[in-house]
Image (cartoon, grey):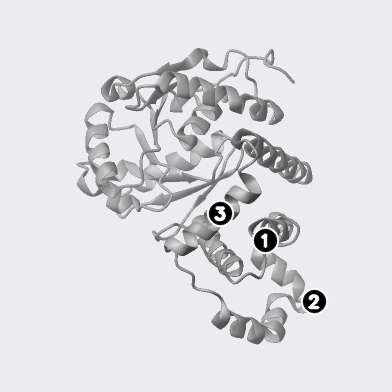
Amino acid sequence: MNENMNSPRLSEDLQKFSPVTVIGAGVIGISWTAYFLAKGLEVRVNDVRPDLEEVVHTGIKRIIPSLQKLGLPTKGLTDRLTIEGNLERALVGAAVVQENGPERLDFKQELYVMIERFVSKDTLLLSSSSGLKASEIAGKMEYPERMLIGHPFNPPHLVPLVEIVPGRSTASSTVEKAVNFYEALGKNALVLKKEMDGFVANRLQSALFREAVHLVLEGVVSMDELDEIVTSSIGLRWAAGGPFLTFHLGGGKGGLPAFLKHLGPGMNVLWEHLGKPHLDEGTIQLLSEQAISFYGAIEQNQLEEKRDSRQLYVLDAFNEKNK
């Protein structure tokens, strides 16, 4: 595939969600921007950084090969892109806002107070926050019912999951609109039934990472060895079935009840022995030294390309299975 693929066309399901304003031109924001453009949406990008235009165009250019491998059109990809440093101009007329600003509650609260001044009452307000609750972010808003979390997993242009997390004041119609938006984009939109710090995916990731750090600190394995263990064992298992289905199948004909009866007691004992490391100065230094030793000699874009290539293989296999 090449950049001469047909230009992106806006599907009927997505027409009502254009234009989209992306606030924050970091890794997540640029990934969302490229994906939205490839789906045919008009996109405005807003950020206060002085090199905004260069950063956005460079970032999109790096993502184009992955979009092409996904089968998405990329010819004229940036034709519907507007880069706007002024927040008001970036927001006027927006149907959707996907905010990707710093993970600071005070910043996001003040930002959403400003956002609602410049958008219509029908504008869908989504935050990519990876842990802050919508109820807290919308705490100073006049109309908090239209704001909720739309948390992607990095990178959004590749990973299907979006966790939709309503706040206490979020209207049910807003949740429905968010689900429709992400599903029209081809995402796996899952609505969480309860607000919780870190949502679901990041809590699971944090739990595994805590034990990974413990095992490295204890000298059981090195950092690169632990990565290899995960990618060649539970990573494969969970990509195919997830932890509950995996253990349900592990119970044989008796399913999960049999598994828990026979192996649950031992697992319960093991839980008591899991590590509880702290990211103190010594731990950070050791992890940093190993990261530099194992990964530092390789350019970051090469590591990203290798990761994305592997993720695409997994997605291809998954999509083929579901045809």
Frontmost of labels 2 and 1 is: 1
Please state which of residues 68 and 320 is positioned toward the viewer in this rendering.
Answer: 68
Q: Secondary structure at mark 1?
A: helix
Q: Is 235 displayed left or right of 284 in the figure?
A: right
The residue shown at (68%, 31%) is 70
Q: Is 267 displayed left or right of 143 in the figure?
A: right
Q: Amino acid at mark 2?
A: Lys
Query: x, y percentage for residue 226?
Result: 67, 61
Going from N to C along the chain, the mark reached first, 2 or 1, is 1
Please state which of residues 66 and 43 is positioned toward the viewer in this rendering.
Answer: 66
Above or below, 99 against 82 in this view is below
Q: Amino acid at mark 1?
A: Leu
Above or below, 246 against 103 in this view is below
The residue that disc 2 covers is: 253
The residue that disc 3 covers is: 289
Above or below, 57 against 284 in this view is above
Q: Residues within 10 Å of mark 2 (few under 14, many from 20)?
A: few
Cβ atoms under marks 3 and 1 closer than 8 Å: no
Q: Amino acid at mark 3?
A: Glu
The residue that disc 1 covers is: 226
Frontmost of labels 3 and 1 is: 3
How far apart marks 2 and 3 lie (CA) works out to 47 Å
